[in-house]
Image (cartoon, rainbow, N blue to C red):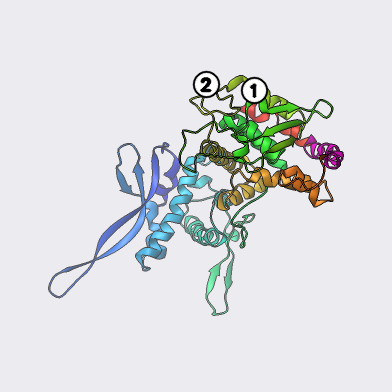
Amino acid sequence: MANNAVSIMNEYKKNIKFIAYPVWINWGQKEDGEILKKQFCVIGIRDEKSKLEVIHPISDFILSKYGMRSYNTQRKRVNHVVKFLNYIVENRSRLEVKSLLDITLSTGVNFLNSLFSSEGTVREIERTLTQFYIYLSQTGCISKIPDSAFEKRENLRGDFYYTSPFKGVIYPSRKLSKVEHTFPEKYIPLLFEIGIIKASPIVLGLYLQLFGGLRVGEIVNLKRSGLKRKVKSGDILARIENQLMRTDIKDSSGSSSVKVPRKQRIFQIKGWYDILYGDHIALYKDKDGSGALFVNRDGKAMSGKSYRQYFDKLKKHFTDYLRDNGDAEDRALAQHLKIVKWSTHIGRGTFTNLVASESDNPMYIAFARGDKDLMSALIYMAKTERMRKNIEKKFEEMHQYYIPRLVEEE
């Protein structure tokens, strides 16, 4: 058994996956000769090309530990182990795992931190993984983990159990907000970089949201002539109004309108606007005569629905990048952003946070967001220069670190 299982990763290619495999076993016989059958769930492997499925010897873990438990319990534990084994197969180069002999406690920690699940689910999988590691140790399938790593304790009923050997697991918060309204400031430059690569048509819009507080409907109603630079400060003034550029769209999910027509100031931060605007103008031009600043792949004015689809694509690539390439803090953020809901409106919320951190008057914030003209623009503008400089200072070190690291990697 041990010899067969040790080579579990050696010759497998990416088209091989571990699976939960249900089987029926003859379990007894009635007096009349009828055979009694019992269903078990074991671990199998499947060739994704040929669809051939076979039972793997590592199933001995399930049968020896959970063989007398219900089928549903077995299936749950099998799914936990299968998820772990597939994680190793998919990441074996990065993890430097060629066989079970190479598995370490860090392998388990990395796997548990890669899960996008609730705290209860992560802890349940951790308990299964603890039993799996003990089994591998007792059967000689792993060699890099000392027996002392598995600590046995006694509970109040006098039963013995093993504590988890995995240190450094980051558990999701028990009380998660259902909706995330703000984006962590330190990750904004990285978000732009991934946006440039994976969602280029909207990356300028992302900037206008994060540093101008614009809504999606306001973004897709902008014309190329609608952005003007304020010469003295270098900031940008956006003319926001309903343009009716997509009268062909009838459903409400695709159409977008402007809530508050106005002129909106966009902060110029570290020269990022100039770079993003220059690239955007060079790459995207309308083909329908609308003069739209943001266009779809057919050259028509972009709809709010299309903008959100690009944003969802960016969300996925951003969280995947943090999960696969980041440190513990990055993976924790990725896990959080996978669980909570967040949409394009997070740009407006983040802008509000940035402005609020530099203003002591809620009326300034409301004006900056374009909610209502609560006071004269002159009083507000007196404050915005200080705001812009302080906000820009927040990104000084991050700008040096991120740009253009990711683009060069690509």
User: x, y (%) of residue 392?
Assistant: 80, 36
Q: Mark 2 falls on what kind of element?
A: loop
Overall secondary structure of the magenta section:
helix
What residue does disc 1 label? 279
**Circles 2 and 1 in contact, beta carbons < 8 Å:** no
Q: Which residues are magenta?
A: 378-396
What residue does disc 2 label? 287
Does residue 44 sit above or below 401 in this rendering?
Answer: below
Residue 190 located left or right of residue 68 = right
Of pointers 2 and 1, the one earlier in the residue sequence: 1
User: x, y (%) of residue 151?
Assistant: 59, 65
Check disc 2 and give the amino acid type. Lys
Residue that appears at 63% across and 50% down: 332
Residue that appears at 65% across and 50% down: 181
**Residue 319 seen:** yes
| Distance Cα–Cα, label 2 vs label 1 | 18 Å
Quarter occupied by residue 355 = top right
Residue 391 colored in magenta in the image: yes
Q: Nearer the viewer, mark 2 or mark 1?
A: 2
Residue 401 located left or right of residue 206 = right
Q: Mark 1 falls on what kind of element?
A: helix
- Residue that protrudes farthest toward the left in the picture: 32
User: x, y (%) of residue 297?
Assistant: 50, 26
Q: Residues within 10 Å of mark 2 (few under 14, many from 20)?
A: some
Residue that appears at 39% across and 62% down: 74
Q: Residues within 10 Å of mark 1 (few under 14, many from 20)?
A: some
Is the C terminus in the top left, top right, bottom left or bottom right quadrant?
top right
Check disc 1 and give the amino acid type. Asp
